[in-house]
Amino acid sequence: MAVSLSRRTGIVALLYWIWDGVDRTIFTAIKFSFPARFVSPFGFLGMLTFTVFIILGVTGALLMFYYQPILDRAWDSVEFINDEVPFGFHIRNIHYHGSNAMVLLAVLHMYYQYFSGRYKIRNEILWMTGVILGVVTILEAFTGYDVIFSERAELAISIAASLTTSIPIVGPTIRDAALGSGFSDFVLRFYAQHVFLLPIVMLGLMAVHFPRFLVFDVPMVMAIGGAILITGGVFPIDMGFKFEPTVPPGVTVPEWYLTGIYAFMRTQYDKFVTGLLWPLVFIISLVLIPFLDRYKKFSWRDRPMVTAFGITSLAQIMVTTYWGFYISPDVSIPLVERLVIDPLFFYGTMILLVPLGFGFTYMMIKLANEAERKSKLVKNTGPQKVATINLSEKWINWLLVALLAFQVFLNIAAYNAALTGMKNISLFLIGIILLVFAAFFHIYRYAMSQQKNAPPPAPVRIVEDLPELSESEVVPEITVDSTSETPKLSDDSTSEEKPKELAPTVPTSATKAELDVGNNNSNLGSQDLTKP
Amino acid sequence: MSDVETKTSEGLSRRDFLRLMGAAGTGLAFAPFIPFGDFMPNPNQASLEKVPVILPDGSHANINTYEINSAQVITYPSTGDAALDAEAFRKWQFIRLPEELGGGKTDTTSIRAYSMICLHLWCLWKYWPEDGRKRGECPCHGSMYDPLTGTAFVGPASVQAAPSNTLPELTLEINSDGFIFILPPKFDANSNGVIGYGRFT
């Protein structure tokens, strides 16, 4: 059985040949690793951001087939996509919620790298391009929700164009050149920037930003995809009201990643200062942080000042983001009073958050040090207890079959829901399918790694109901890279120590592609990331 | 070219001369592209001329029938292209002032036409004729405009430095039958104002 699976036909040989040919291209400079076990997603949040970028590229290209970037048609064409085009609702919702996911993942990615000090030692360029990439990502998301040209989009475009005009001296010229001179220009030019200029800039920055080691964790990628679809199913994005120039729009707030800036603007200070200068100061200080951070160590616990500033900025972002959303619902008070945020109160709160952030950081460092001290004591005194789920081979097989059957059921349910017009239910179910696949793949790779490290067959005949799993021929064929793999896996469970000496393996790989991991140990990428 | 020769030469060395020629050639080769920058701003195609004030219902506005203390949206300059006329930059609030501000008269002092683009962040404001309001209000950040002068008196637009606190205005004319016309405006800050930027009073 194993033989028939690994046989090479002409087509397969051709694919291997192509894969090996890629060795001569730039792509092999990037070392992808597909982890064989669960690894913390914090280490590859950037990879997840990129994956969502690809999802957005695909769905965005599909939306371009129907969208019309014309002042009085933009909203109607989006409505057509949403209501009439088969699966247009799905594509639009994946695109919308994907954009939110991308911004969120990018912000999380940045803060994880910030607190773990990864921007040090020759990673400065990666960090700086990353910050710029984040800003462009937000611009991309912003231009995206504007091209619908609903009432809210019109307000957002107005604010963007008028903020550009407010730049001293060069503002009006920049606005005329980049955005044109009226709303019909704005819609068209925002569209051109959304679908071409900004993505090209992002790709260029990515070429610089990509580190050489990347982790592509299939279950986590699937889970993120599933989460986007489930969010789309539960909270499908609405159309908003079509913008009519003779009807002044109602009161709205921007998307969540801009309400922070919106809160600053609502203090009524000069719009250039609040809308452009403060964000610019924040971005520039982020870009410069590798040069301001003089600590020799990496951990957030050893860099109290940097950590405290990070915590403070996070707190300020969260507070202003919420504050930007909040508009008093009482319509009896005049609009000005509902909208204007008292600058003294606002900036007072911002300043108050600084000592609070520092105090919180001090507390967290104390707690973390204490926890580490205790865990060391425990380690020295008693055996380390790790909860594990141990499934026999037989049960793993049944689990995989059951998950497959569940996926078949979900597929039928999702398609049926789409046919009967329950679009968001269908989207939700497809999200569940992706999550189930994430679980399926995790169990699959677990089973494969068990297989790899399986003890050699005992001299006597064992189980007869699953002969293919205990065949001795299988072992050397698949465990090609286990020479480097085994010591690492062995600290998980002591039972896996045996194969190291009992079944010394022979590297028999003909091509790198055979291992589907490049020429490396499958955990190379993640291991490299955890290196200081 | 020997070193000795270079050192002793009085004027420009041959090497520097070549560099200068290279720089000049490169500069001249790319100079014609500088005016290409004019590609980016959209040229304004509409010719500005004296036109009647056409109300949304298609009728020509007349001072004898236009209601006191009311406002309607007019389009100027109108192109006849529905997509371009939907442009907010072509929308003006055409206001007949309330009685107490002189709206009862039948000359041009009783009517106003202000750009609908709020000077703060370019949302569209509108005139509210209700008692106690009788002012232009912006839905976004609550700027309020005096219908008499077009100057903001409350909200973020009012704290902006001149000219960005006063709305652009169209000059109007009334003929002997009471029909109202728009005179060709000059869109700069010292005359009719710049849409979205402001006007010196």
Image (cartoon, coloured by chain):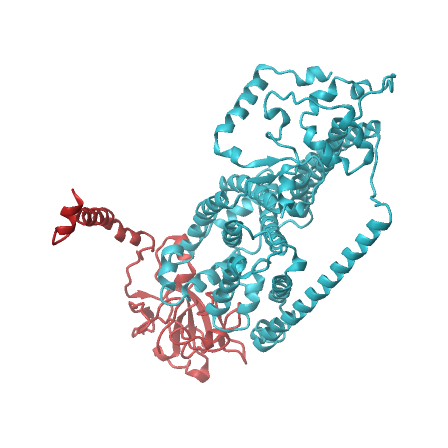
Chain colours: A cyan, B red
Tell me: B78 left or right of A292: left
Residue A16 horizontal/vertical position (percent): 57, 22
Tell me: B54 left or right of A271: left
| B32, A212: nearer the viewer | A212
In the rendered image, the vertical position of residue A313 relative to residue A390, given as above or below: below
Q: For the N terminus of chain A, which image quadrant? A: top right
| B17, A253: nearer the viewer | B17
* Residue B95 picture quarter: bottom left
| A259, A504: nearer the viewer | A504
In the rendered image, the vertical position of residue A1 relative to residue A435, given as above or below: above
Residue farthest to the front?
B4
Residue A394 makes an appearance in the image:
yes
* Residue A469 picture quarter: top right
Residue farthest to the left?
B10
Residue B69 horizontal/vertical position (percent): 47, 76
In the rendered image, the vertical position of residue A377 relative to residue B48, given as above or below: above
| A83, B31: nearer the viewer | B31
> How many labels were placed on the picture?
0
Residue farthest to the bottom?
B100
Residue A20 horizontal/vertical position (percent): 54, 25
Residue B200 horizontal/vertical position (percent): 35, 76
Residue B14 makes an appearance in the image:
no
